[in-house]
């Protein structure tokens, strides 16, 4: 099966090269058969990558310990669930997984547009094939996952009785879903990149490439968001440090394309509505894709030290080469066809939705550059001074919290501004009430002792943004209710379904408000660590923790030392918590299973830290983390909002069903639509 | 009833606003002791966890707590504090011992100042660029167009064409 998989990947490489070279020939000759054959070669590439990936999974499931990658990342007692995750737990497999997910996207694009956009698709196909060639080169010639096990320097191959097992930190349910989500985000941004570059090379007229890629961009963005949040939750639940975001270089790497991708999702509206920022949008897509590649490179190169850098190798030069080539191609295409990106740049007023989008983009970009430069600062400082100066979480918090709050402020202000021009009267009318509510909330908070500056500001802005969003829903639903007479919630749903993009966007904003509420709670975290004997208690906040027992429990793949901790509140028993310390049998490594009692108010987070080396007593490390649950809830709302925004508008469906011909009185309808949207959308 | 509606809405929103406050215990902010504060300024130098000395949980280690290295560093901080040394002096003692890698955040002096200054520079420069771009984009008002809201509502042929295309696209979907 390893030979079969290896051959499938080699064949996939050949097909990708044909799709790339043949695609260029097809663009030049415009021969329909060549266009068709290169498209089919693209599809075959994807099919062969699927085959190669399934072969590697098969080797994991059948415990084939003649393959070096399987030996390094699995063992016989590893559950089937984690054998799936073992695929992306090391360098070689994770790169193959990149190719696999990219193939899913590429195949979807090739099938979706097989009979559409004939002028553009050959260019898109060539770009996608180019990216696939790079990853298939790594899969075949640099980091093959199908290498047979051999003694160092020897040519004799052998089979091991058992493998080394999977890294304990990865043996957690979220690790089975976090990387696929994050990688789906990384790989997904290849599609808007391919369309942007393809459209630029083809000088494809209008903004059609943006309309074609909107859904792909949103899907990639949703997966990236979900991946980041799941990663944060994994760090929270497994690493046992009481936090969820440590500004680790690998975490930062996942945030960078998310920031530029978010900026793009906003600025793209400027191009759609007003034909503005065409150059900016193209470069935002290019940068987002390049940051995805940079993120993949940082995770694997060892350039920056990271607790997450699970797979390091000598692929650095390949990634740097690919980034440089891509950058050169992007620059070349831009310089050659920049006149095609001429914008219709005109504003009626400084106070307009367009201006707010510009500032929104500025802040996202500044946040991105600040995170990137902070992440790479240790490298720069070593180059310039010879000393490697560390940049840790305190720096990133100080720099990014103010930027985050400004973005939150714009999240509230943006929807209040109309396209083209906003009068001061309407601004005061729309701005006044939410701002007042926010300030009242801030005053109440201050009176309650909420004195941490950033948390207080975050709270005021969260309330302000929530108020603007709810008022938008309320106003729209009220108009529908006046006509239809249904209940307000039903009208709000109807309103959302009539313009899913706009109201889905508002739901996403609301999700971000929840996330910010959760982040604001971090200022009030506290923790206590104590070595305890059975029967002893410790206090944290309103809770009393009593150690009832420490038991040793042998499991299939590890031995667990489990604490039985009784939680009391006001001297009344509330529940039992079972934090664990796990020792994995094959690789002798340790893992932590944190016990969390989570409410909207706070998380009681209990870690069995281990046995105190000095006193030989078990140690409990308990944290009281306020509002953390709001972050995960906010994440769910963000995903829900994205799914809503991806739905077609209800009205459009009705038009399709009821009217086979295009609507006749279009100018009037359009005029009224434009008038209506002046203050919204 | 109509007049009461905004009041009800405002009450709900203020309720939403104060919900997190009611959930967070008043006066929950507890300033940590000085050792802990200093421990957050220096990194654990065990070489594998990349966390601060006070925040070290040493993932994967036998003890999830400050690891041996972090514990020793925190004890050393305690000793410096006992001698009555100021924070800067304590930090310098660790820099002499471990080098600049021990900083949890770059010092605000020398080359490290670049790290602190650059985000503000990006923001200021970016803001200037945005203001410049907006000022170039803003249409100069002509006498016939006026400056009232009626002018703003006028639909240009380009905007009409764009809106037509959008309507057609939405119908396509």
Image (tube, coloured by chain):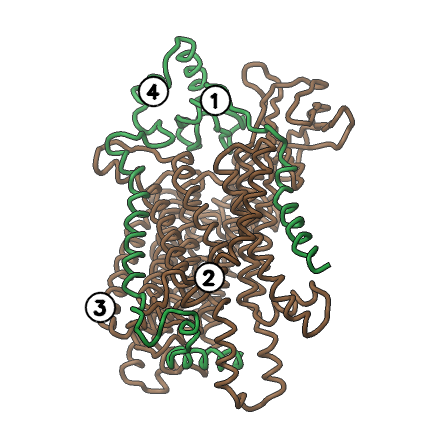
Instruction: Name the side, left or right, on which B21 lies relative to B137.
Output: right
Subunit under mark 4: B
Which residue lies under the disc numbered 2? A417
Residue A487 pos. (x, y %): 73, 66
Same chain, labels 2 and 4: no
* Label 3 to label 2: alpha-carbon separation: 35 Å
Which residue lies under the disc numbered 1? B36
Chain coloured brown in the rendered structure: A
Secondary structure, mark 4, is helix
Mark 4 nearby-residue class (10 Å; few <14, some 14–19, many ≥20): few
Residue A420 pos. (x, y %): 40, 68
Residue drawn at 63 percent across, 49 percent down: B13
Subunit under mark 1: B
Say if mark 4 contacts mark 3, CB within 8 Å: no
Subunit under mark 3: A
Observer-nearest residue: A237 or A136?
A237
Above-or-below relation of B113 to B14? above
Which residue lies under the disc numbered 3? A335
Same chain, labels 3 and 2: yes
Residue A622 pos. (x, y %): 61, 28
Instruction: Name the side, left or right, on which A370 lies relative to B51.
Output: left
Which residue lies under the disc numbered 4? B88
Chain coloured green in the rendered structure: B
Observer-nearest residue: A74 or B110?
B110
């Amino acid at each position: 099966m390893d030979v079969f998989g290896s051959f499938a990947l080699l064949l996939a490489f050949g097909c990708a090269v044909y799709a790339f070279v043949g695609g260029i020939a097809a663009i030049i000759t415009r021969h329909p058969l060549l266009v068709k054959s290169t498209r089919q070669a693209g599809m075959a590439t994807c099919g062969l990558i699927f085959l190669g990936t399934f072969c590697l999974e098969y080797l994991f499931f059948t415990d084939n310990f003649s393959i070096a990658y399987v030996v390094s990342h699995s063992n016989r007692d590893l559950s089937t669930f984690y054998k799936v995750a073992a695929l992306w737990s090391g360098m070689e497999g994770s790169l193959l997984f990149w190719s696999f997910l990219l193939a899913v996207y590429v195949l979807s694009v090739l099938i979706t547009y097989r009979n559409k956009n004939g002028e553009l698709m050959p260019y898109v196909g060539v770009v996608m094939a180019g990216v696939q060639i790079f990853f298939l080169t790594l899969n075949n010639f640099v980091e093959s996952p199908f290498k047979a096990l051999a003694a160092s320097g020897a040519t004799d191959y052998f089979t091991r009785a058992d493998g080394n097992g999977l890294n304990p930190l990865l043996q957690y349910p979220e690790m089975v879903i976090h990387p696929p989500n994050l990688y789906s985000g990384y790989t997904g941004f290849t599609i808007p990149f391919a369309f942007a570059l393809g459209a630029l090379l083809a000088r494809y007229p209008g903004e059609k490439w943006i309309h074609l890629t909107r859904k792909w961009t949103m899907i990639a963005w949703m997966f990236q968001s979900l991946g980041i949040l799941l990663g944060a939750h994994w760090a929270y639940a497994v690493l046992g440090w009481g936090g969820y975001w440590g500004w680790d270089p690998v975490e930062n790497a996942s945030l960078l394309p998310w920031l530029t991708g978010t900026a793009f999702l906003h600025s793209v509206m400027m191009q759609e509505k007003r034909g503005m920022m065409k150059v900016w949008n193209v470069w935002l897509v290019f940068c987002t894709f390049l940051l995805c590649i940079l993120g993949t490179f940082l995770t694997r190169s060892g350039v920056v030290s990271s607790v997450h850098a699970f797979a390091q190798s000598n692929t650095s030069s390949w990634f740097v080469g690919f980034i440089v080539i891509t950058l050169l191609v992007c620059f070349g295409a831009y310089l050659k066809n920049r006149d095609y990106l001429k914008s219709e740049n005109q504003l009626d007023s400084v106070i307009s939705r367009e201006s707010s989008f510009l500032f929104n983009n500025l802040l996202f970009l500044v946040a991105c550059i600040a995170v990137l430069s902070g992440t790479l600062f240790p490298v720069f400082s070593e180059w310039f001074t010879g000393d490697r100066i560390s940049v840790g979480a305190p720096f990133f918090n100080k720099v990014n919290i103010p930027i985050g709050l400004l973005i939150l402020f714009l999240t509230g202000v943006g929807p209040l501004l109309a396209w083209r021009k906003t009068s001061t009267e309407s601004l005061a009318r729309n701005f006044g009430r939410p701002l007042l509510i926010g300030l009242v909330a801030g005053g109440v908070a201050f009176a309650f002792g909420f004195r941490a500056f950033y948390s207080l500001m975050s709270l005021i802005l969260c309330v302000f943004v929530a108020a603007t969003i709810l008022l938008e829903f309320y106003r729209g639903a009220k108009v529908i209710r006046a006509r239809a007479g249904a209940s307000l919630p039903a009208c709000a749903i109807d309103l959302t379904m009539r313009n899913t993009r706009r109201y889905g966007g508002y739901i996403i904003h609301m999700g971000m408000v929840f996330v910010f509420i959760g982040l604001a709670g971090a200022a009030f975290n506290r923790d206590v660590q104590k070595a305890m004997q059975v029967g002893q208690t410790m206090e944290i906040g309103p809770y009393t923790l009593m150690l009832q027992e420490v038991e040793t429990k042998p499991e299939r793949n590890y031995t667990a030392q489990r604490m039985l901790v009784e939680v009391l509140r006001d001297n009344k028993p509330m529940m039992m918590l079972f934090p664990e310390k796990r020792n994995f049998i094959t690789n002798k490594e340790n893992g932590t299973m944190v016990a969390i009692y989570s409410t909207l108010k706070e998380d009681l987070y209990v870690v069995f830290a281990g046995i105190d080396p000095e006193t030989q007593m078990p140690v409990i490390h308990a944290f009281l983390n306020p509002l953390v649950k709001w972050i995960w809830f906010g994440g769910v709302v963000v995903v829900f909002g994205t799914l809503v925004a991806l739905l077609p508008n209800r009205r459009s469906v009705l038009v399709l069903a009821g009217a086979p011909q295009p609507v006749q009185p279009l100018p009037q309808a359009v005029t009224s639509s434009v008038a209506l949207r002046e203050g919204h959308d | 009833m109509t007049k009461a509606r905004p009041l009800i809405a405002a009450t709900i929103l203020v309720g939403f606003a104060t919900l997190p406050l009611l959930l967070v215990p008043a006066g929950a902010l507890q300033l940590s002791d000085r050792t802990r504060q200093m421990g957050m300024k220096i990194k654990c130098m065990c070489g594998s966890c990349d966390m601060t000395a006070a925040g070290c949980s040493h993932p994967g280690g036998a003890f999830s707590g400050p690891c041996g290295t972090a514990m020793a560093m925190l004890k050393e901080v305690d000793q410096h504090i006992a001698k009555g040394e100021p924070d800067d002096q304590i930090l310098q003692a660790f820099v002499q011992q471990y080098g600049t890698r021990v900083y949890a955040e770059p010092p605000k002096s020398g080359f490290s100042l670049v790290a602190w200054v650059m985000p503000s520079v990006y923001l200021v420069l970016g803001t200037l660029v945005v203001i410049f771009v907006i000022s170039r984009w803003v249409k100069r008002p002509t006498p016939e167009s006026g400056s009232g809201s009626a002018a703003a509502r006028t639909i240009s042929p380009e905007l009409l064409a764009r809106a037509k295309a959008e309507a057609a696209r939405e119908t396509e979907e």
